[in-house]
Image (cartoon, rainbow, N blue to C red):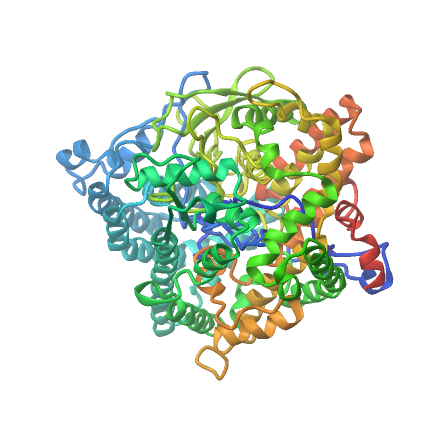
Amino acid sequence: MKRITIIATFVIANTLMATTTTSRASLNLLLRRSPPRLRNAKFFSSSYSQFSPSASPKSYPCPIWSSSFSFCLPPRSTSTSLPFRHFSSSPPSMSSAISAAVDSAVCDDSLRSSNPLLQDFDFPPFDSVDAEHVRPGIRALLQQLEGELEQLENSVEPSWPKLVEPLEKLVDRLSVVWGVVNHLKAVKDTPELRAAIEDVQPEKVKFQLRLGQSKPIYNAFKAIRESPDWSSLSEARQRLVEAQIKEAVLTGIALDDEKREEFNKIEQELEKLSHKFSENVLDATKKFEKLIIDKKEMDGLPPSALGLFAQAAVSKGHENATAENGPWVITLDAPSYLPVMQHSKNRTLREEVYRAYLSRASSGDLDNTTIIDQILKLRLEKAKLLGYNNYAEVSMAMKMATVEKAAELLEKLRSASWDPAVQDMEDLKSFAKNQGAEEAGSLTHWDTTFWSERLRESKYDINEEELRPYFSLPKVMDGLFSLAKTLFGVDIEPADGVAPVWNSDVRFYRVKDSSGSPIAYFYFDPYSRPSEKRGGAWMGEVFSRSQVMAQKGTSVRLPVAHMVCNQTPPVGDKPSLMTFREVETVFHEFGHALQHMLTKQDEGLVAGIRNVEWDAVELPSQFMENWCYHRDTLMSIAKHYQTGETLPEEVYKKLLAARTFRAGSFSLRQLKFASLDLELHTKYVPGGPESIYDVDQRISVKTQVLPPLPEDRFLCGFSHIFAGGYAAGYYSYKWAEVLSADAFSAFEDAGLDDIKAVKETGQRFRNTVLALGGGKAPLKVFVEFRGREPSPEPLLRHNGLLASSASA
C-alpha cells in the first residue's frame, strides 16, 4: 500500500458471507479482570500504544470468516472528492475542481469536451466513462498537477493557509479522477479498462512518490511542529502534521538519492504486482464453470441455489434453463460456491468445487506463486532501505499495536481457542457418524461446511434457506435506515436519478439530519455480477467532508460514500432474498459508511475514516453487526416477502442461541490467517529453504485442527495481504472486535428496551466514534464514549467463550 496520506483514500471491505457465528467467534485483546493467563495482556494500554495516524490504506479487505474461505477480493481503488456548492435537497453541485486542473494548455478544448473525466460534473460520470478516456484524462491531469506542485514547493510556508490548504486542494483533484476509473475497474471491469489503467498507473505512482518525497513540503511540516505555535493547534491538526512527517519518512524522504531511486522502483513494482495478483484472482474465479445436466447431481441444494444456477446457465447461452429441470451452471462466485459447500449431498461435487476454489490463481498464466514471492522480497527490501528489520515493523509503524504485541495477542487467543476447536471437530465427526455418513471417520475439508450446517440445523432447528423469505432486501434496508434514525437521529431517503450510476441495480440515497438538511449521500450496489464485478463487499469513500474543499457560499463539502456487496440477486419475480450472513454484511458495511458520512471533522485529511489507525477502523462496522441480534431490530426487518408475517419468536430465540455455534473453530481459523500473515512478514526469507507453502503448512500445525491438503494453494487467493492493505495487519480484526463488543455493551448497560437510553447512548456514539474521525487517537475516542478503556468481557460473553478463556 502507498504510504502517502494526503493522496491515499480509503476503501473498506468486508466479507460477503460473514457467517453469523464467526464474526463473533473470537476471544479478547486484553483481560484486565479475567482468568490469570490472559489477565495482564493490556493490548490497548497507552503505555505502548502508538497514537500516530494510520497508514493510508488502499483497501480494508474483509476478514476470512467463512469456513469456506473468504469471498472478499478487495478493490484497489482510491476514492474521490469533489466540492459541494450548496446544502439544498437538490443534488450538490461539484464542478470547478476538475476543470481548474485541466484549464491550461495541458488540455485543449477538444479533449475537455470529449472526455467526461475532464468535464464539470455534479457527481462522478460513472455512466459515461470508458477505457478510451483514461489515458488522455489521467495524463493531462498529472501534467497540470506537476506544475502546481512545483509552484507550491517554490512558495510554501509553514502555515496552514500556505501549506495544508493548497496541498489538500492539489491532491483532491487527482483523487477525483483516479477514483472514478479505479472504482469502475472494481465494479465494471473490462480488458480495455484494465489495459488503460495499467498504462497510466506508473505515471500516477511516480507523481505520488514525487509528492510524498517533496522536501520543501516535508520541511514545512517539520517547521510547523517545531514552531512556538504548535501547542495552540487543535489535536486534529497536530495529528495531521505528525502523520505527514511520519508518512514522508516511510515514503523514503530521508534516503539518499541512490537509495531513494531504488525505493521508488520497488514501489512501482509492488503496485504493478498487487494489481496483477488481484486480476489473476478475479480471472481465475471467472474461469471456472461447472455445467450440470443430471438433476441427481444437484441433490440437497435448495431452490434458491437451483434458481441462481439456472439463471447463470441462461446467461451462458442455455436459454431454456430452469431451476426445476436445469441445466445449471456452478461458478466460484460467492453466492454460487457457498450453497454447494453447505448443502450439496454430492460429495464428489463438493470436492471438485472446493479444490477449484482452493487452487484459484495457482497454475498456468494466472499463477500467483511467483508474484507472492516477488511481493514479499520487495517488501523486505523496502523495509531494509527504511532501516527496519522486516516489513511487519514498517506496517506497524502506523498502527496502534507493535509486532510484539500483535504476536502476543495471537498466541494468547490461539491457546484459548484450540481446545474448543478440537471439540468442535469431534462433535462434527460424532454427528456425521450418527447420521450414517460413510465419510464420518475421515471428514475432510469439503465435508466440514456441509456437516456443520446439518449439525446446526439439528441442534437449533434452523435452516438458513428457510429464513431467506423473511429477509428481502427492501425490508432489510428499511429496517436498517430506521435503526439509524433511532440511534443517530438521521433520515435516509432514496435519491435515485440524482447521480449517474454504473449499473441499473445501483441505488442512490440522501442522508439528512434532524433539521431536514442533507449531510451526506451514498451509492449502494448490492448484487453479484461475476462477469465484471469483483467479489466481496466494501465501503468506499467517494467524496470526503472538507472545509477546504467547500465551494463559495458553503461552509463545508459534504461526504459521499459507496457501499458495494455481492449478495444473491433477485431470481425471476422474487426480490433479493438474503441469507442472515448477507444481512450482517450489509449492516457491517453500513457501519463503515456511517463513520465516513456522520463525521463532524472539517479537516479533510483527518475526516471520517481518514487517519484512523487500522487496528480500530473496524469498530463501527462490527458494532453495527450486533444489532442483527437485537430483537426489535431483527423483527423490524424479518418480514416474509409474500405474506408480511414476522419471523416467529421461537425462530428468533434459536437464531440467538446459534450465535456461538462453533465459536472456537471460527476464532482459530481467523487466527491461522493472522498468524500466517505475520509470519510471512517477519521471519520468512524469500528465496530461502522454505517456500510460502511450507510456511503455511508449518503455521497450520498449531492453528488448524484439520491439517491443510498438501496441494493447498490458498495463499494464491489471499488478496487481503497481497492485493489489499492488510499486509502484516490481518491481526487487527481481532484487535477491533473487543472495541466493537464493548461499545455495544454500553447499549446493553443502558438497557436495550429503554428507547430513551438507547437514543442517548446512540447520540454519544455518534458524537465520538462516528464524529471525531482521525482527528483524535482511537483509544482516546473510545474512552470518551465509554468512560474507560476497553474490556474484553462483552466479547467473551457474546461468543460464549468466557469458560474457555478461563481454562486457557
Along the line of sight, the residue nearer the viewer: 104 or 217: 104
Name the spot of residue 99 as percent of width and height, x first.
26, 33
User: Is 289 left, or right, of 695 in this rendering?
Assistant: left
Q: Quadrant of residue 472?
A: top right
Q: In the figure, 5 relative to 410: above or below?
A: above
User: Is 319 left, or right, of 60 in this rendering?
Assistant: left
Q: Residue at x 60, y 41 (%)?
A: 621
Where's the N terminus, which quadrant? bottom left
Q: In the figure, 777 relative to 212: above or below?
A: above
Along the line of sight, the residue nearer the viewer: 461 or 740: 461
User: Is 720 left, or right, of 412 in this rendering?
Assistant: left
User: Is 752 left, or right, of 25 in this rendering?
Assistant: right
Q: Quadrant of residue 98?
A: top left
Q: In the figure, 203 relative to 646: above or below?
A: below
Q: Residue at x 30, y 48 (%)?
A: 151
Question: Residue placed farthest to the bottom in the image?
Answer: 689
Name the spot of residue 586 as percent of width and height, x first.
55, 36
Name the spot of residue 203 as percent of width and height, x first.
27, 55
Where's the C terminus, which quadrant? bottom right
Question: Residue placed farthest to the left in the image?
Answer: 110
Name the spot of residue 299 as percent of width and height, x first.
51, 46
Can residue 768 be seen here? The reply is: yes
Q: In the figure, 779 relative to 761: above or below?
A: below
Can residue 233 be seen here? The reply is: no
Q: Please state the total of marks drawn on the protein image.
A: 0
